[in-house]
Structure formats: structure tokens, C-alpha cells
Image: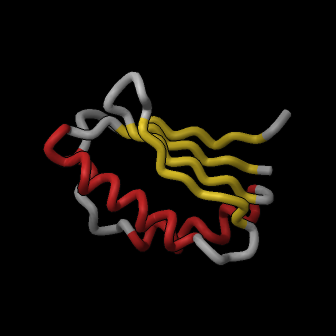
Amino acid sequence: MFTLMSIHHPHPEHRDALIDSMHRYGAALQGHEGLLSVHTLADARSERLVGLAIFTDREAFERLAPLARAAVAEDPFDQWESRETDGFALTEI
């Protein structure tokens, strides 16, 4: 299993646009072999948004990632977020 977790720090006025972007990213992955689940989550204790995508293995992620990235390629994350996204590439140990 391979999990991609991205923690976003949106400016309040761009929160909805960032959520839409995260949904488009996930939608681009839906239905493809190798994806187990994909989620857009809001932290209950802060303004952070979390993207969580779980794949069967790293190879599935590497095969599907270009589809998801293409869906959000034109999105101005540098304007929407107060700082760079914290990204984690997680494998079970």
C-alpha cells in the first residue's frame, strides 16, 4: 500500500477554489485500477485541508499521478495558499 497525503494551507478567500481543485484531482483518479480511495478532508482544529489518496502500491501511484496532476496543472496554488503544501509519500512499515 502507498499513501499520498498533502496538507494545504489556504488563504481564507481561496478555500473554496482549493477544495474544488482537490476534488478535481481526486476525480481524475477515480475508477482507475490501483486506486483504493481518495479523500478531501478538513482539519477540525485549523484551516488546513488534507488530500489523502491511497493506492495499491507505489507503481500505481506513479502511473496515475500524471492524470491527477494534469487536472490541476493550471491552478494557481502559489496564490491560493499561505505557504507551500506539506506532502508525504507514505508506505506501511
The answer to whether residue 8 shows anywhere in this view is yes
Counting the numbered discs, the total is: 0
In the rendered image, the residue lying farthest to the front is 44
Question: Looking at the image, which residue is at 72% across and 58% down?
Answer: 55
**On the rendered image, what quadrant is the C terminus found in?**
top right
Vertical placement of 61 versus 7: above or below? below
Colour logic: secondary structure
57 relative position to 40: left or right = right
36, 45: nearer the viewer: 45
Picture residue at 68% right of the left edge, 47% below the top: 3
Task: Note whether 59 is above or below 14 in the view shown.
Answer: below
Quadrant hosting residue 58: bottom right
Give the percent coordinates (x, y) of residue 39. Answer: 55, 53
List x then y, in percent, for residue 68. 50, 68
Locate residue 44, reporting x and y percent. 42, 28
At 27% across and 62% down in the image, what residue appears?
75
Query: Which residue reaches farthest top?
Result: 45
Q: Is residue 85 visible?
A: no
Q: Where is residue 87 drawn, in percent x and y?
A: 51, 40
Quarter where residue 48 is shown: top left
For the point 75% across and 68% down, the residue is: 34
Q: Which of 67 and 50 is in front in this view?
A: 50
Residue extending farthest to the left is: 13
The correct choice, above or below, for 74 with respect to 43 in the image is: below
Residue 18 in the figure: left or right of residue 42? left
